Amino acid sequence: MSLLDHDPTRAIALAIDHIPQGVAVFDAGLRLVTSNQRYNRLLHLPEDLIRPGSALFDIALFMAERGDLGPGDAAQLAIERIKELTAALTSVTQRLGNAGQALEFHSSRLPNGGLVVSFSDVTARVRAEQQLAQVNQTLERRVEERTAALKQVNTELEAARAKADASNHDKTRFLAAASHDLLQPLNAARLYTSTLIERAKSTGFAELANSIEASLTAVEDIMSALLDISRIDSGALKPAPAPIQVQDLLKKTEVEFAPMARERSISLRIVATKASVMADRSLVGRIVQNLVSNAIKYTPVGGKVLVGLRKRGNRWRLDVIDTGIGFNRDQHRLVFAEFSRLERGARMAQGLGLGLSIVQRLVTALGLTLELDSREGSGSRFSIYLPAVRNARPTSQPEALPPEPSFGTLSLKVLCVDNERAILEAMEGLLNHWGCEVRTALSLKQIDREHLLEGWYPDLVLMDYHLDQTSGLDAIEWLRHNIGGHLPAALVTADRSPAVRALAEDRGIAVVTKPVKPAALRATISGLANQGGGKRGV
């Protein structure tokens, strides 16, 4: 049996000497019980102040007189330093050492009234944070430069629209740059409407609220299509063909457009099929939606629209046929031009003339063939050719999110950070309705300035990606450093690029895309709450 087995106190003292942080333990009277060599070396204390029984006040007074605690009366500085270390059960403070290094102190009160103080040299980390701040400042300047450049591009684009040979590439750049700003107010509107729908249930306003929601959904669909097109043109969005059952697409089309056809007294017939094709389900679905929508819009009351498939060799030809106004061969090229509409069609229906332009872009991006047959006054046939699939098991339609339950509360503390005040107000209203306690901020500076996290620890954080001073990912890292490394978090963003999603996944951060769908948001929050082990408590 070794000497250490007979002397546990000495064993503990030897053990803490191997800890990389400086450690000191004080009794209930704030007198030194023990300290390790790292503590003595970093603080450069004299021998008489590292002996057991040395008063914490004497140690603080010595450092104050040496200038470690800044200018001022040494005794007063020593008292204030002791208050910082003992005022709370736990505290984290930073100060400069006498050699100019950055020291971070962690203090904890013991059950018997004693005090444990540990600290480490964090000079390297502080320098890294300073470098990050400089990078953020550089990024802010770059954003300002890009904003100025965007204004210049928009000016040039407006002039280009007045010319017959306007450049499609410039329009794509305009849509890609403007879409994020357009999605921000739409996101706030969707959140407000979701709260309105919940509160209007079983009232006379329920139908009105649902109609508003349907209209916003239509706007969102258009914006999503434009975003996808801009990403396709830039090469950022890659189609993902897979075996699919065409009947799934046709059934969805029938459900979506049957009310519109009935309202115009138009016969919409969808021919059932068992055909399977190789295609990108989402993008081909958008093509069919645009073609059917156009067919109904430009078919006179009492007309007919037919959607079905015909086998053509090793391909299926998907036809959308109408008895509408039609057009002559000389007008074929014009109908696919952006912001261009035939005079008779413009009189029949409102719009921007983007529908067929979107179809053509999607067909080109997917490598498909688009065929048009039309006669003025007799109707039109728009057809796309899809590769047939044999002996392949079609992929199933992704399951929709379950409807949000109308009972139960989340009872969570949620911190929301977004640089748009309207979005924060709308998000707060929705989360409050779900029973959450919410605190909001426009930036990390506001959180720090208003002490939003003093005595209040969130169960999770919902963070915008495009903040004014930094990215949402870096902001979440800052919060985790100051609150706790396991703080559950979700990035709420209109940026749908794979790069942002990959960065978030690498850091264990969920992603919710704007405009926010309440069911998806609630599912994400529930998942984060489970990830965090329920309520964190104060």
Image: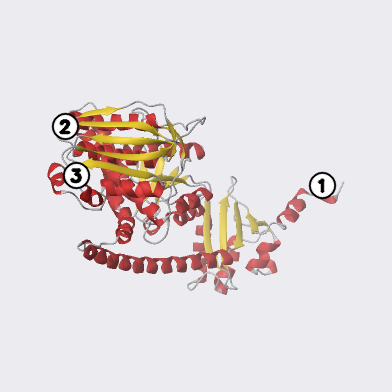
**Mark 2, mark 3: which one is toward the viewer?**
3
Residue 232 coordinates in the image, percent (x, y)? 39, 52
The correct choice, above or below, for 262 with respect to 72 in the image is: above
- Residue 237 point in image, percent of width and height: 42, 50
Q: Residue at x 31, y 53 (%)?
A: 179
For label 3, the residue is: 327
Disc 1 target residue: 5
Give me the C-alpha separation between circle 2 and circle 1: 93 Å
- Counting the numbered discs, the total is 3
Q: Residue at x 43, y 46 (%)?
A: 461
Secondary structure of residue under mark 2: loop
Disc number placed over residue 315 in the picture, else none: none
Q: Which residue is mark 2?
A: 264
Are there few (<14), some (14-19), or many (20+) residues within 10 Å of tag 2? some
The answer to which of marks 2 and 3 sits earlier in the sequence is 2
The secondary element bearing badge 1 is classed as helix
Q: Can residue 440 be spotted in the picture?
A: no
Given residues 135 and 245, the one toward you in this image is 245
Quarter location, residue 207: top left
Please report the residue visible at 34 percent of the width from the left and 43 percent of the height from the top: 516
Mark 2 belongs to which amino acid?
Arg
Q: Residue furthest right?
A: 1
Query: x, y percentage for residue 255?
Result: 29, 29
Marks 2 and 1 in Cβ contact (< 8 Å): no
Q: Secondary structure at mark 3?
A: loop
Q: Earlier in the sequence, mark 3 or mark 1?
A: 1
Q: Amino acid at mark 3?
A: Phe
